[in-house]
Image: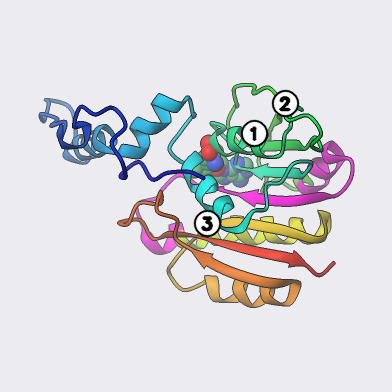
């Protein structure tokens, strides 16, 4: 089970107390300085670097899976908005995509993203805009069958306008949900990032019709000052 990085200090050197201060620099905006300072002092960022994950987002899916256990050996997983690949790294291990755990079923993972994704052993990645016409059919072709888990961490670049960002992410999330209704095996799981802000009620209603259990979760790795949360819908009715 994943430990929270804010928990025990494993180095024994009092790392948590060593706050990195970033001086404001000519040409750098105050918001960038604040971002840099937050990154440098974020225990999840440090842990991701130490443990070889491509980003702190890896801990969000770890914590969600520790709670709901959907990434099981042998699972066929679709990772929407997978770049740079942190969620896939976690999934590759947990679904036994490399067959490292003998006697356990071997899983598969297919990831897509707008951006180029560095290859990862055990995963198949494609660069694709999931909102493009026909993108869902293309992903289905690559998948070549049904999936047990569809997970989406898709998020459009921030516009700086809260309501616009909210509507954009909800549209990504809804498209991912409809895709999951097409490809999920009965009993399958849909996991997606949403932003609190109003429009998520409709999606909840829809998911409750299609799945036996729908939970809204804010994993510890999700920053408390962010309005993101995750919906985990389990037991697809088919
Ligand atoms: C928060 S990041 C995902 C991080 C990833 N889960 C990880 O652990 O590395 C969100 C991703 O969604 C992708 N994205 C946004 N809109 C998309 C779209 N229309 N189609 C595919 N990917 C999209 C972005 O390019 C970005 O890489």
Residue 206: percent from left, percent from top: 68, 74
What residue is drawn where x is 72% and y is 26%? 100
Indicate whether residue 231 is drawn in magenta: no
Total numbered labels: 3
- Is 15 in front, or is 31? 15
Indicate whether residue 158 is drawn in magenta: yes
- Sequence-wise, the earlier of marks 3 and 1 is 1
What residue is drawn where x is 52% and y is 57%? 168
Marks 2 and 1, how far apart at CA: 8 Å
Marks 3 and 1, how far apart at CA: 28 Å
Q: Picture quarter containing residue 102?
A: top right
Magenta highlight range: 136-165
> Any mark on residue 93, and which?
1
What residue is drawn where x is 24% and y is 36%? 41
What residue is disc 2 on?
A: 100
What residue is disc 3 on?
A: 169
């Amino acid at each position: 089970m994943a430990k929270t990085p804010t928990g025990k200090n494993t180095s024994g050197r009092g790392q948590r107390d060593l706050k990195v201060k970033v001086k404001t620099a000519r040409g750098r905006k105050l918001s960038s300085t604040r971002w840099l300072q937050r990154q440098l002092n974020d225990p999840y960022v440090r842990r991701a670097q130490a443990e070889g994950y491509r980003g702190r987002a890896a801990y969000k899916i770890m914590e969600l899976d520790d709670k709901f256990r959907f990434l099981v050996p042998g699972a066929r997983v679709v990772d929407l908005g997978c770049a740079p690949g942190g969620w896939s790294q976690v999934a590759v291990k947990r679904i036994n995509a490399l067959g490292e755990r003998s006697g356990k079923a071997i899983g598969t993972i297919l990831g897509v993203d707008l951006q180029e994704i560095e290859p990862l052993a055990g995963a198949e990645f494609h660069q694709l805009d999931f909102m493009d016409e026909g993108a869902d059919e293309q992903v289905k072709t690559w998948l070549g069958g049904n999936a047990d888990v569809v997970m989406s961490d898709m998020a459009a670049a921030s516009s700086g306008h809260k309501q616009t960002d909210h509507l954009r992410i909800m549209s990504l999330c809804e498209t991912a949900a409809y895709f999951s209704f097409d490809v999920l095996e009965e009993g399958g799981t849909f996991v997606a990032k949403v932003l609190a802000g109003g429009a998520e009620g409709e999606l909840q209603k829809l998911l409750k019709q299609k799945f036996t259990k729908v939970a809204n979760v804010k994993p510890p790795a999700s920053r408390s000052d962010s309005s993101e949360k995750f919906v985990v819908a389990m037991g697809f009715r088919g």
